[in-house]
């Protein structure tokens, strides 16, 4: 039995009679700047992540320009929830750097 023709907007299956052959796409050719950008992104995210995770818990956090602008702002600046939120953003950066390092295998020659 012959399958019904595809309706409007439907793609016929590749094994259907009369269906056009679908060629496989060639693997992408990576250049040096693709590799450099991936390594640079992983490095920057790692550095920013470490700084954002550790800096809110150092004494320098309480003694800087932003902490001394106004007394009202000082109470927000020294709030532990703000410090935790900044450290959380640092953890996200560390996760991004880890994912980028794991994705560097895409540049390996096959």
Image: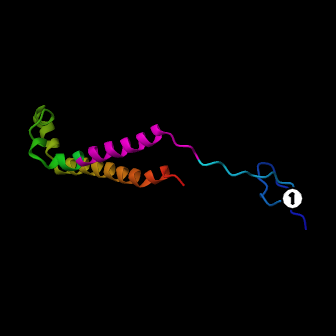
Q: Secondary structure at mark 1?
A: loop
Pick the residue in front: 60 or 23. 23
User: Residue pushed farthest bottom?
Assistant: 1
- Residue 15 position in % (x across, y down): 80, 61
Left or right side of 7 for 53: left
Where are the magenta residues, as a range?
Answer: 28-50
Q: Main secondary structure of the magenta part?
A: helix
- Residue tagged by mark 1? 17
The quarter of the image holding the C terminus is bottom right
Q: Residue 85 at what x, y percent from top left? A: 25, 49
Queried whether the magenta region covers residue 44, the answer comes back as: yes
Residue extending farthest right:
1
Residue at 35%, 53% in the rendered image = 95
The residue drawn where x is 40% and y is 50% is 100
Q: Quadrant for the N terminus, please.
A: bottom right
Instruction: Determine which quarter of the picture holds residue 6.
Output: bottom right
Q: In this picture, is 39 found above or below 98?
A: above
- Position of residue 11 relative to residue 30, above or below, is below
**Residue shown at the point (30%, 47%) measured from the top left:** 46
């Amino acid at each position: 039995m012959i399958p019904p023709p595809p309706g409007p907007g439907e793609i016929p299956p590749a094994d259907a009679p009369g269906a056009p052959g679908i060629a496989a796409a060639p693997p992408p050719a990576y250049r040096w700047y693709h590799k450099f950008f991936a390594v640079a992104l992983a490095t920057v995210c790692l550095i920013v992540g470490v700084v954002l995770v550790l800096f809110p818990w150092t004494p320098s956090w309480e003694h800087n320009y932003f902490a001394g602008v106004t007394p009202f702002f000082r109470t927000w600046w020294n709030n532990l929830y703000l410090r935790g939120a900044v450290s959380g953003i640092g953890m996200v950066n560390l996760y991004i750097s880890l994912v980028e390092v794991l994705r560097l295998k895409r540049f390996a020659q096959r």
